[in-house]
Amino acid sequence: MSAPQILAEAVNKVFRSPDGQEVVALRDIELAVEPGEFVCLLGPSGCGKSTLLNAIAGFSLPTSGRLVANGRAVVEPGPDRAMVFQEYALFPWMTVAKNVAFGLEIKGEPKETIDRKVGDLLQLLSLSEFANSFPKDLSGGMRQRVAIARVLALDSPILLMDEPFGALDALTRRNLQDEVLRIWTEFKKTILFVTHGIEESIYLADRVVVMTYRPGTVKTVVPITLRRPRDTASPEFNDIKRHLTDLVMEEQRRHEEDEIRKG
Amino acid sequence: MPAGTGAAGKRLLQSILIPFAVLALWEGLSRAGVINPLILPSPSKVVIRWWAYLKPFQSYDPAQGPYLSWLVSGELLHDAAASLFRVFVGFFIGGGLGLGLGLLMGVSNTVYRLMNPLVQILRPIPPIAFIPLAILWFGLGNPPAFFLISLGAFFPILLNTIAGVRNVDSIYVRAARNLGAKGSVMFRRVILPAAAPHILTGVRVGYGVSFIVVIVAEMIAVNSGLGYRILEAREFFWPDKIIAGMITIGVIGLGIDTALNRLSNHLLRWHRSLESS
């Protein structure tokens, strides 16, 4: 059996809130994502799914436990764990082409290589005619396409996606979900995708990891074996959806009770 | 579009209506002898004086040198050049130091904590209050003027640069780290452009203060430049020349501010707030 692409062992993350109280964001997380697997982290706000993703990305390391990505312990952020953010996080002062080229320029690749790769990626994501536009002139969906092109340029085996389509309308979202599936198949990426969209997780993932609300633990792992492209209206899809909705709503209720208690 | 040009014509008319009315009233009152010309000369007198101030002192004589140097030998052009020279030297010294220290204080919390108390103490002192010390330290002439103008440019650029760097949205830093950016690449390609809108605001404000300070400094510490000239004109009871000098100061100030504004809009063409303009 090959080694997992991403491995979390006994991962804990404790934050200290401004009033001095300890908040356990993650408790004893065990997760292994195999090479080429598409895994969704699903749960309500506050379940620690983004915290786990940020820990794997190296932005905020765990308080205890072990995180391994691409066979190396995670100690800092790096281009081998490319991340797509919900807020797009494009550099507004760079054109679309410059945004995509930035990671390659940091790597110090020769200019011709960069130009060729950027041209190919812009074409792949139907962005060629916007190469010289600034991000402010693009719609949300187009911006997220640029962000995806930017991380694909890094040639990272892992893609971390933090609610990337949360701010988009339903039609644009479906369009980009299909785009991500196409890229995942074509480039054989390992994808860890954070979402609170139940349908989105079933549409995309090989496995859906449902997380509990505070402390964040792995509640259940649900394998999705439906053939792709998946039909969101099929009875099988909706059976899974019902099951996952029950699981997520339990946590959502705990989240709401907690909010009410805090006032 | 005829409707568009009509509307534009109407707007133009509206914007020049009041200035022309004021000028006409002023001219009329002066000619009627209502206003003492030693207190307020008529606009036409000011224009005539301004022309005399602008044009070469002597008539053209090829033996004295080339035509072009004769053409710019007028007093006004010399004064304007002297003032602008002082503004630019002072602005580049003060602005350069303000930018450098501002970037350091923005990036490093240690430098910020060390320097901020001193900055906060000195910042509210108007540069003009430094005039006595400037003369004590540097005597008369250009050096005290450079010092005062530098001070005028220094604080606005310093404070805006600090704010710009400290308020860089952390999402850009996170995205850049994820792409592998560190150290100088992070600074040049991410921090600096992200802080640019603030820095350029500081540049415009700093330039504005420099331009105020140069006029005051010339009234006190040096004997050339536009500020010196309008004070000198008062001693000779030439109110028309005072006003001609004031208008020159206004036109130059507006010209440079417009140029800076254009430059800033060009550099920040990527910026969201310019979306509609």
Image (spheres, rainbow, N blue to C red):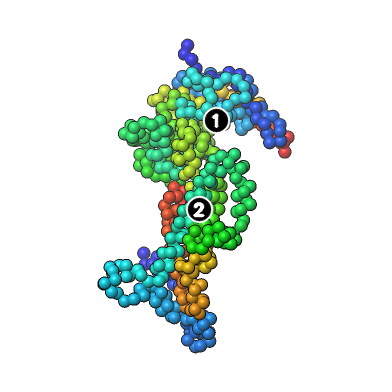
- Seen in the picture, residue B87 relative to B243 is either above or below; the reply is above
Amino acid under disc 1: Phe
- Badges 2 and 1, same chain: no
Residue in the foreground of this view, choosing between B252 and A74: B252
Expressed as whole percent of the image width and height from the top left, the position of residue B242 reads 49, 74
Question: To which residue does mark 2 refer?
Answer: B94
- Seen in the picture, residue B52 relative to A245 is either above or below; the reply is below
- Seen in the picture, residue A95 relative to B215 is either above or below; the reply is above
Expressed as whole percent of the image width and height from the top left, the position of residue A16 reads 67, 31
Please report, as a chain letter, where disc 1 is located.
Answer: A
The residue at 41%/74% (across/down) is B53
User: Which quarter of the rendering shows the N terminus of chain B?
Assistant: bottom left
Secondary structure at numbered mark 2: helix
Expressed as whole percent of the image width and height from the top left, the position of residue B88 reads 45, 57
Q: Are marks 2 and 1 in contact (CB under 8 Å)?
A: no
Of the numbered discs in the image, which one, if any, rests on residue A59? 1
The reply to whether residue B145 is in sight is yes
Is residue A153 shown left or right of residue A162?
left
Secondary structure at numbered mark 1: loop
Residue depth check, mark 2 versus mark 1: number of the one nearer the observer: 2
The residue at 56%/47% (across/down) is B163
The residue at 49%/18% (across/down) is A71
Please report, as a chain letter, where disc 2 is located.
Answer: B
Residue in the foreground of this view, choosing between A44 and A74: A74
Of the numbered discs in the image, which one, if any, rests on residue A258? none
**Neighbour class for label 1 at 10 Å: few (<14), some, many (≥20)?**
some
Expressed as whole percent of the image width and height from the top left, the position of residue A189 reads 44, 24
